[in-house]
Amino acid sequence: MSKHSTQTLAQLVQPDRVHRTLYTDPAIFALEMERIFERTWIYVGHESQVRNPGDFVATRIGTKPVLLTRHGDGRIHVLHNQCAHRGAQVVADASGNAQEFRCCYHGWSYHTDGRIKNIPLRHGYSQRLDVNDPKLAMVQVPRVQSYRGFVFASLVADGPSLADFLGYIATSLDDMVDRAPDGEIEVAGGSFKHVYHGNWKLYLENLLDVAHPLFVHQSSIEAAKVQDDSVPSDGSGEIAIRQMRQNGASYGFFESQVGIWAYPNGHGYMGDYHDDAKLVAAMNDPVFREYREALEVKKGAAEAKRILEVKRWNTNIYPNVSFMSQFQQFRVVHPIAVDKTVVYTYQFRLKGAPDRIFRHAIAFANVVNGTGSLVLTDDLETYNRIGTGMGSAGAEWIQIGRGLDTDVPDAHHGRRGKNSTSEIYLRNMYDAWLGYMTKGGRGLAAAAE
Ligand code: FES
Ligand SMILES: [Fe+2]
């Protein structure tokens, strides 16, 4: 039994501070896996990754290995990646296409929807072995739902629908897809994987942290400032340089021009950091003009304008996704241990857009958000330092109170920071955390009902 009761957990989250153990205690990590990751909706992949029958992608729900598969009848399933015989992981590849899944140990094989296909030496087993028992299979995860191609799964059979879980933050997923002239996006171009020695929550926290770039990214800001803009390029490098320079904007800009929004269930987004006019179109980039024209042809001028004027930067869908629609980048958080986290970054291609738009997105990822990039590496160092710092016997409480007295309601059942450097996104994630951990519930959403 856990040493943490509902009461003791509730005491660890206060309006303006949380206890350090939330980032360091393995018992709390184990409870988070059970009460958050194994109860709510978790993003497991995109339909384009399993386009054809037999396609599969290995991923995790919390620390539990699962497979996203497409069966012969076209349906998508999420299967526990465990053999029903003696427990071996059945599929060791990260992705691929298969007619069947065969266990490496004694050769039991499974259909791509998880049902048993063949048991070698079947006659030797007891007659009580019922091959039609759904538990004698690669067991299906009970709930799998897609929203516009994004597949989420839940390990529990009952609970809020995916639509309820997402609420207003679904509009950020709309923003990802709407930007494709053909109305469809697909995962393309491989993925980045990075590991850091810190808690999983740090990643989501940092992606909405408006107050950190000026310090954390100082070296790339300085490097970008001295770049010579007159040197010809294909445009992709310029986008990254503009981003790095933008990180060096004054605090006046960060406090007043950027927006930070928080919604039920821990979701939130940072907006107005850039818009297409500042980041791409203002460069008079012919590729962007071509893209905008393609969008106008397919969607009409008014709708294309509306789509391109959405100014969201990073969106978090708590607890395992952060993404950026302007550069079609999706990052999936895999908690490994209380002090170890792996993040996979995927790139999407906008169908119907010029190829060079995708190349710009890849260049942006390489320079800004890639494993060897000039920007992400700063953030990784920070996560590692937080992991190390919290291992000391310093301050017991972590401060999350910035903006607490000035946050204002938002029209869509959320709240926003009046000052953009408000830590409302942290309080909001902890509101959801508390709901999941102590009430089996849904934080703000439960409170609003
Ligand atoms: S453990 Fe899989 S066949 Fe024996
Ligand atoms: Fe950063």
Image (tube, grey):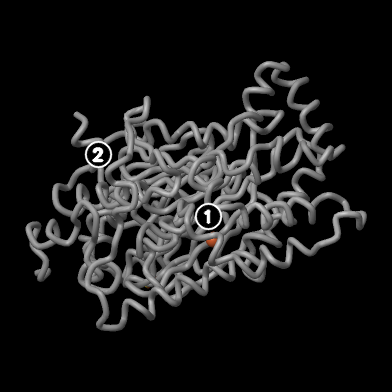
Question: Which is nearer the N-term, disc 2 or disc 1?
Answer: 1
Q: Residue at x 81, y 41 (%)?
A: 283
Query: Of the residues shown, which amino acid type is indicated by label 1?
Result: Arg
Ligand 2 closer than 8 Å to the CB at disc 2? no
Disc 2 to disc 1, how far (Cα)? Answer: 24 Å
Q: Which residue is mark 1?
A: 331
Ligand 2 closer than 8 Å to the CB at disc 1? no
Quarter residue 346 falls in: bottom right
For the residue labelled by badge 2, is the local secondary structure a helix, a strand or a loop? helix
Q: Quadrant of the N terminus?
A: bottom left
Query: Of the residues shown, which amino acid type is indicated by label 2?
Result: Leu
Q: What's the mark number on residue 95? A: none
170 sits to left or right of 28: right
360 sits to left or right of 234: left
Quarter residue 37 falls in: bottom left
The residue closer to the viewer here, 220 or 368, is 220
- Asked whether the viewer can see residue 27, the reply is yes
Q: Position of residue 310 (x, y in %)?
A: 59, 31
The residue closer to the viewer here, 12 or 252, is 252
Q: Which residue is mark 2?
A: 444
Q: Position of residue 197 (x, y in %)?
A: 43, 76
Q: Residue at x 68, y 56 (%)?
A: 245
For the residue labelled by badge 1, is the local secondary structure a helix, a strand or a loop? strand
277 sits to left or right of 197: right
Q: Quadrant of the C terminus?
A: top left
Q: Position of residue 13 (x, y in %)?
A: 19, 57
Which mark is in front, 2 or 1? 2
Q: Position of residue 256 (x, y in %)?
A: 50, 41
